[in-house]
């Protein structure tokens, strides 16, 4: 069992006698009040996975600009003959 122990999800209050009753019980043992069980909530489906992006179509401006800067630096520091 993960997490700390808590009575919050295991006990509920009877609306008639205001005493604590086990959450799994449908009848209060103190005053014989019959309570209606709540329906289990339906978990929604996870959102669909995003479509994969073709990386070869994405413009690589930062890579292109870095290449231009490197070539400019290499051309500037070329040894002179």
Image (cartoon, helix red, strand yellow):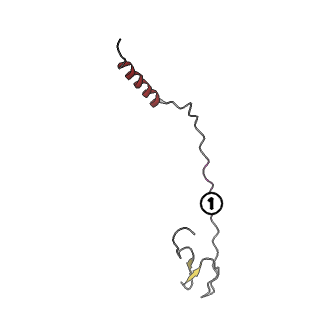
- In the depicted structure, whether residue 76 falls above or below residue 10: above
Q: State the residue in front, 69 or 58.
A: 69
The residue most toward the bottom is 30
Q: Main secondary structure of the magenta part?
A: loop
Q: Which residue is mark 1?
A: 43
Q: State the residue in front, 12 or 57.
A: 57
Q: Quadrant of residue 30?
A: bottom right
Q: Residue at x 57, y 84 (%)?
A: 16
Whether residue 45 appears in magenta in the rendering, the answer is yes
Q: Residues within 10 Å of mark 1 (few under 14, many from 20)?
A: few
Whether residue 27 appears in magenta in the rendering, the answer is no
Q: Residue at x 49, y 30 (%)?
A: 60
Quadrant assignment for the C terminus:
top left
Q: State the residue in front, 39 or 71.
A: 71
Q: Which residues are magenta?
A: 41-48
Q: Quadrant of residue 42?
A: bottom right
- Count of numbered circles in the view: 1
- In the depicted structure, whether residue 15 falls above or below residue 70: below
Q: State the residue in front, 46 or 60.
A: 60
- In the depicted structure, whether residue 37 falls above or below residue 78: below
Picture coordinates of residue 73, whole percent (x, y): 37, 23
Quadrant assignment for the N terminus:
bottom right
Relative to residue 75, is residue 24 drawn left or right? Answer: right
Q: Residue at x 64, y 82 (%)?
A: 27
Picture coordinates of residue 4, whole percent (x, y): 51, 71
Q: Secondary structure at mark 1?
A: loop
The residue most toward the front is 81
């Amino acid at each position: 069992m993960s997490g700390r122990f808590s009575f919050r999800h295991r006990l509920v209050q009877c609306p008639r006698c205001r005493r604590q009753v086990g959450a799994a019980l449908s009848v209060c043992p103190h005053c014989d009040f019959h309570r209606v069980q709540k329906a289990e909530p339906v978990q929604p489906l996870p959102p669909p996975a995003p479509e994969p992006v073709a990386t070869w179509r994405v413009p690589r401006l930062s890579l292109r600009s870095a290449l231009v800067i490197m070539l400019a630096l290499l051309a500037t520091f070329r040894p002179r003959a």
